[in-house]
Image (spheres, rainbow, N blue to C red):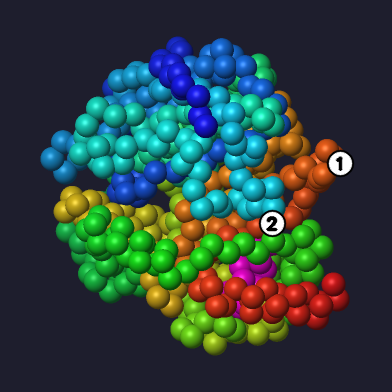
Amino acid sequence: MPLTPSTTLVYPENPVWTGPDPDTLRLVDGNDLVLQFVLNSCHVVPGPIDVERFCKAVGVTVGRFPHTAGRLKRDGDSWSVDLMNSPVPVTVVDDDTLTAPFPEKDRYHIIQQSILPFVCEVPMREAFLGEDVPLLSLKLTRLLKTGETVIGNSWNHTLGDGTTVHNFMHTLSQAYLGLELPPLPSYVKRKWPDPRKEMGLGDEAFKEVTPHVVQDFTLDELLARYEKEAKEVIMMDLCFTNGELDAIVKKAKDGAEEGVKLSKQDALSSYVVSLHNRILERPIVTYRTRDVDPDALYRHPQSAGNCTITAFADVTGKTQLDDVSEMAVAIRKETNKCRTNDWTALYLMLNGYQFEQAIKSGRFHMSPHPGYCIINSLLGLDENGLRSFGYKGRSQYYTETSWERMFRVHPANPVRRADGAWDANQGSVVVSFRLRPDLKQKMLDMKKEDMAALGL
């Protein structure tokens, strides 16, 4: 059982603020108003973490991300994170019963059913109401039977997306190890015009560019929908070895038009959609990918915020393995389109407006809608290498939350074998989602048949 925990309140060390306003981070863009979610994640390392050095590194890192020591505030219809240099709680607990945070057979699963025992979850509703509660908390769980340490992180989504969490934890790992720190984060925000009053845009523009945020719900309605879904579907992971991924990419590229450059993610997304469309009663007809604008118009490499944009591709009728190439090309064309400045500006203006209008009324958006799927990929982030805390090649990353038809993509964790050696799983990928339990084995059998057809 967990022994008596201790909590240290860590204040920012020499806070460096690069935002435009001296005392606040104004959430002028509705895209940052992701108020209904908390991001929980953890790293498991096969050894000790020095608590004093860790707390020192937390102070340094929070000083470089001072909004994490702030408080969410609402003034009428305006939201901000007030920079109050409040302390970030770091809890340390010893546990003498757990032999591992998750069963050994599940160690490659990035998305877990729950990691709540290993985080001190920050309050969501209280923050939304503007109460004096932290937006970030950290927790060290020392597993006495195995000698492992679990580094838990609970993060209010208004502080930033998964990439921002990655940048924060990378900085924390570097500070802990005494290594060179990444560049300071950027807090550049752009205030977009009112698309209806100032730009004269109507409902059709929203339906065409941002159909995923046209419908909204109260928070209770949203949570009820997710709870209902959770009872009807189970968690599912598809693990692709480096060889399997290469074969899927080759299949997609062999059928692509000349001059079209397809990524691994394009090919993998297309294949996962094709698997689902072969077994779902209501097939996926619209593919959404959450992408990042690389231009200084909105996105900075060290941006602290929710800087994702969403591209849509029509995949109606695409069900077979041979359709992977056509789907991958369609996805790539839409992704390229959404990386142009004009499209990005239009999307962010409309999406931010919808978020802002909903939040003002205490309403939120649900996704994905029936007939849609979402690819939420962190395939390009070295989650274990850049956040190793001195255990490179042996650090395992975990998080939670999965939905039906939302495909979360991560590099596979390294796994320790029975003889104590580590398999790096370099190049392997895990795709996590939820699926009706009666369809699980059918999908696994179909994947096996497809890999055989690809010569594996």
Decide which of 388, 175 is in the foreground and name it.
Answer: 388
Q: Amino acid at mark 1?
A: Asp
Left or right for 413, reference 186: right
Q: Is residue 275 magenta?
A: yes
What residue lies at 45% left-to-right and 18% top-to-bottom? 6
Local SS, label 1: loop
What residue lies at 37% left-to-right and 55% top-to-bottom? 348
Decide which of 446, 16 is in the foreground and name it.
Answer: 446
Mark 2: few/some/many CA within 10 Å (<14, 14-19, 20+): many
What residue lies at 48% left-to-right and 17% top-to-bottom? 59
- Horizontal and vertical percent for residue 99? 65, 37
Left or right for 260, reference 399: right
Local SS, label 2: strand
Dominant secondary structure of the residues highlighted in magenta in the image:
helix
Decide which of 289, 129 is in the foreground and name it.
Answer: 129
Please report whichever mark, 1 or 2, sits nearer to the chain's N-terminal start.
1
Determine which residue is flagged by label 2. 429
Determine which residue is flagged by label 1. 419
The answer to whether 285 is drawn above or below residue 394 in the figure is: below
What residue lies at 63% left-to-right and 22% top-to-bottom? 49
- Horizontal and vertical percent for residue 338? 49, 62
- Horizontal and vertical percent for residue 267? 67, 68
Q: Amino acid at mark 2?
A: Val
